[in-house]
Image (tube, rainbow, N blue to C red):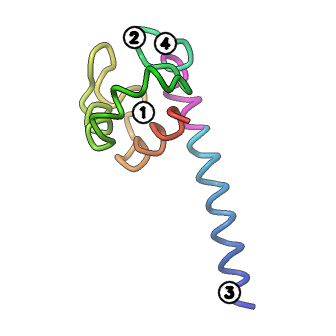
């Protein structure tokens, strides 16, 4: 019985995390990544993301944190952690 509660709790956390990523995206990333403003790779545009992904996720997270091109340091998410940036990038490349 306890294992069922643990599995249910993990499932709820997973749903909350997915919702949080989408909420963060809508609060912080959508402004540029939905339209491709200032050269930002559009969400879901695999061709635009491919050369960036070749550099590796660690580089993408570092560029997000430090800024790159027209994107300011930390993008529009000043309180995001590296793990949150990683989740947001993964959300945008799908």
Report the residue marked by disc 4: 36
Instruction: Tell us which disc is closer to us: 4 or 1.
Output: 4
Q: CA distance from mark 4 to mark 1?
A: 17 Å
Task: Name the element at disc 1.
Answer: loop
The percent coordinates of residue 51 (x first, y second) are 34, 26
Q: Position of residue 55 (x, y in %)?
A: 27, 34
* Helix, strand or loop at mark 3: helix
> Which part of the image, by quadrant, shows the C terminus?
top right
Q: In the rendered view, does 48 fall on the left or right side of 31?
A: left
Query: Circle 3 sits on which residue?
Result: 3
Upstream in sequence: badge 1 or badge 3: 3
Mark 2 is surrounded, within 10 Å at the Cα level, by few (under 14), some (14 to 19) or many (20 or more) other residues, namely few
Check residue 39 in the rendering and tell me which mark sits there, or answer none: 2
State the residue position of label 1: 77
Q: Secondary structure at mark 2?
A: helix
Magenta range: 23-32
Question: Which residue is rendered at x = 27% and y = 31% of the image?
Answer: 63
Crowd band around label 4 with a 10 angstrom C-alpha radius: few (<14), some (14–19), many (20+) = some
């Amino acid at each position: 019985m306890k294992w069922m509660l643990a599995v249910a709790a993990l499932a709820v956390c997973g749903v909350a995390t997915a919702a949080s990523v989408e909420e963060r995206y809508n609060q912080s990333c959508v402004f540029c990544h939905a339209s491709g403003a200032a050269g930002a790779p559009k969400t879901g545009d695999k061709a635009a993301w491919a050369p960036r992904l070749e550099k590796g996720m660690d580089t993408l997270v570092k560029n997000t944190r430090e800024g790159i091109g027209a994107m300011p340091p930390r993008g529009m998410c000043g309180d995001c952690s590296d793990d949150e940036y990683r989740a947001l990038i993964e959300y945008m490349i799908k």
